[in-house]
Image: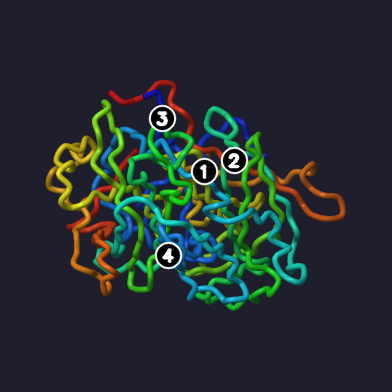
Amino acid sequence: MEADNQTPEIFGQTPWQTVGPFFHYQLPWKGCADLTGCSDLGARLDLMPAEHCLLYRAAERGPISGEPIRIIGRVLDANGTPVPDALLEIWQANAAGRYHSPADPRSELPLQAAFAGFGRAATAADGTFHFRTIMPGPVPGPGARLQAPHIAVGVLGRGLIKRLVTRIYFEGDAANETDPILAMVPASRRHTLIARRTAGGDGGEDGVAAYCFDVHLQGERETVFFDC
Amino acid sequence: MNSIHYKREDAAQPPSLFPAYTSTPARSPREPLVRIPQTLTETTGPADWEQLLGPAVADLTAQHRGMPQGQRIVVSGSVLDEDRRPVPNTVVEIWQANAAGRYIHLRDQWDAPIDPNFTGAGRVITDAAGRYRYVTVRPGAYPWGNHYNAWRPAHIHLSLMGPAFATRLVTQMYFPDDPLIRIDPIANAVPLPYRQRMVARFDIDTTMPSWALGYRFDIVLRGREATPMER
């Protein structure tokens, strides 16, 4: 008999496979890119018939502590062509630097139930994405040194057999200079991880700071991706 | 800090660049990945599934007025780590084509019929022993534009977060005795024998008398490192 999932001799990590082009009616929920509010941001409701739209809508939530920010950008391929069928996932600490996770043992730091710190955004037809969140606080890194504020990013999509992992750091934060993870990245490529502060992006939203972060899957400006 | 660290990828994980899957050459990096230690960022992950994604939907055949077309099936198994530790209270997101091989997605241009009684999206959360179970119909194979006469084998997409950012997994479950698996560039990005980890087993004990065929499929996430690897 041919080996299969239940064969003890080949037991081990289940292999990654691409999300393919048709993940939009499952993975992005309504508001998945809005970590502080409850809009439809992040979903692609234009890609499914209304009678088959079963997407969950994020619940109403109260105000969330911290500096509100927006992150806008594009996913681009080797030729600089926008990728319209990618999905970004982000994971971050709250403003106090605590992760909303049972694996963060630092109970002395405040948690806010309304801020999960996890979000998704499906790219639009022009390859753009847009998150609303708050600036994360600093978290400990290797050797108990503090890491600069950052957001972990997973990139999935058609043509991506497995997830690519990167990080968003923020332009103008002095802690970037001493960040232990950035220090492991060749100096000439560090800029690919630093979101640039912009004047408004898509029209400006009541004074909320906007940061621009493009993901270049390949090419001269290829983004740094991590093995972690 | 005595936080848990996770093992790295094992030999089963496919490369990002697999030219036979023709969307990968322009969408995969050419620079080597930068290896970094796992920090609290990578060893933590979201856990409040219901608040985040919504309540479980374990019966994909009960989302509309009538029964969907096709062969009803039950899929069950466990979510484990590499050391066979169960992964409790973790979410499994599910999506698939209908019995004719058609997705309800508007970009799916194949002319196989839409089934008004089948959307093909569900979500289950593992119990304290890491077990999950859902009901659906067997998806059909379908043609795609990768190369001349390309057909995807029947498959169900599965998405798992696990306990940490580092344990994220998206995979596809295939069915036994499907001749399309060995000629499918996406499945073939995973070398043998590991490719067979993605093939479910028909199971008479999971099969429900006079109701549905049963398949077993265990999902294995990255295991824990014996000792922290920092420093």
Q: Nearer the viewer, mark 1 or mark 3?
A: 1
Chain of the residue on which disc 3 is drawn: B
- Same chain for the residues under marks 1 and 3 in the image: yes
Local packing at callout 4 (Cα closer than 10 Å; few below 14, some 14-19, many 20+) is many
Indicate left or right for A217 with B228 as reference: left
- Give residue A142's position: percent from left, percent from top: 28, 29
Mark seen at residue B89: 2
* Residue occupying image coordinates x 46% and y 55%: A18
Mark 2 neighbour class, 10 Å CA radius: few under 14, some 14 to 19, many 20 or more = many
**Which residue is under mark 1?**
B47
Dot 2: chain letter: B
User: Are callouts 4 and 3 both on one chain?
Assistant: no
Q: Is residue B34 visible?
A: yes
The residue under label 1 is which amino acid type? Ala
- For marks 2 and 3, give the CA distance: 19 Å
- The answer to whether residue A225 is above or below residue B193 is below
Badges 2 and 1: C-beta atoms under 8 Å apart?
yes
Q: In this picture, is B38 found above or below B110? A: above
Image-quadrant location for residue B26: bottom left
Q: Are circles 4 and 1 on residues that touch, CB within 8 Å?
A: no
Q: Which residue is mark 3?
A: B5
Viewer-proximal residue among A1 and A18: A18
Q: Which residue does the image show at 63% across and 37% down from the upper left?
A: B130
